[in-house]
Amino acid sequence: MSYNFSKGSRKFGDITSELDSNTKIDFEEDYIGLKTGGSDRLVVSGSNVGIGTTQPSDLLTLDSSTPCIQFNESGANRSKIFVNFSDNLVIQQQQSNKHIVFKVNDAGTVREGMRLNGGVPEVVINEGSDALVNFRVESDSYRHMFYVDGAENKVGINTSSPTQILDINGDTIRLRNQRTIPNSNTLGEPGEICYDANYLYICIGIDTWKRLPLDTW
């Protein structure tokens, strides 16, 4: 039974299956290739690993018409990351009503940053007690073009310290479309504001409107 043991290093050329000449292990300088069906399927080249390519450009390189990493659990499809036929990167949750969750380490505490909620048709920020508190969108000139102060339950436009439920750091807002309220009892909800060429209309109660005349100067 001594053939089960080997002492010292041994040198091999390529190893080809006795049953299938298209299946082999290809040894070259700083290169090992596993071939099936006559093509390289898995390659170790230098310090990089390639699947579907003989020239991996990164630590792990996948090359196919639709490169994909499939995650299974007990044999069942759960999620995958792939490039589709339109060359879009797709992260897909395959389990019904489950989420895609992005987390970060916030000074030693792992917190949820963003969630794509599979149970409801929503993109959710700050879901759960371990979520990051605030949400910020930058523009070309402003760091806090849109800001949600989660702890204070306030929203800021161009401000990081909103003092009201909506705080706009600017001197003008715009309603692009005009609307005429024909009667003071027109259907409406308290707080609705609109205008036309002659009046500014404000709904002060359910189906109750008042108007201010607009003068030229």
Image: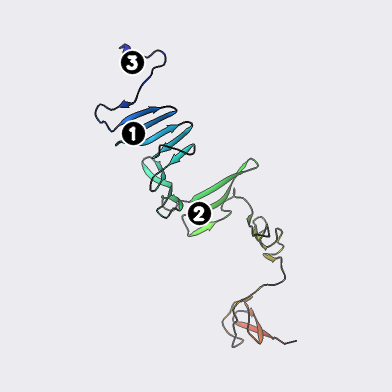
Q: Amino acid at mark 1?
A: Lys
Q: Which residue is mark 1?
A: 35
**Comparing labels 1 and 2, the label whose residue is closer to the camera:** 1
- Mark 3–mark 1 Cα distance, whole angstroms, equals 25 Å
Q: Position of residue 193 (x, y in %)?
A: 64, 78
In the figure, is residue 150 to the left or right of 41?
Answer: right
Q: Amino acid at mark 3?
A: Asn
Q: Residue furthest top?
A: 2
State the residue in front, 69 or 28. Answer: 28
Position of 13 relative to 43 (above/below): above
Q: Which residue is mark 3?
A: 4
In the figure, is residue 172 to the left or right of 115?
Answer: right
Look at 45% across and 38% down and name the residue there.
56
Q: Position of residue 19 (x, y in %)?
A: 24, 29
Position of 52 relative to 128 (above/below): above
Q: Residue furthest left?
A: 19
Where disc 2 sits, the SS reads strand
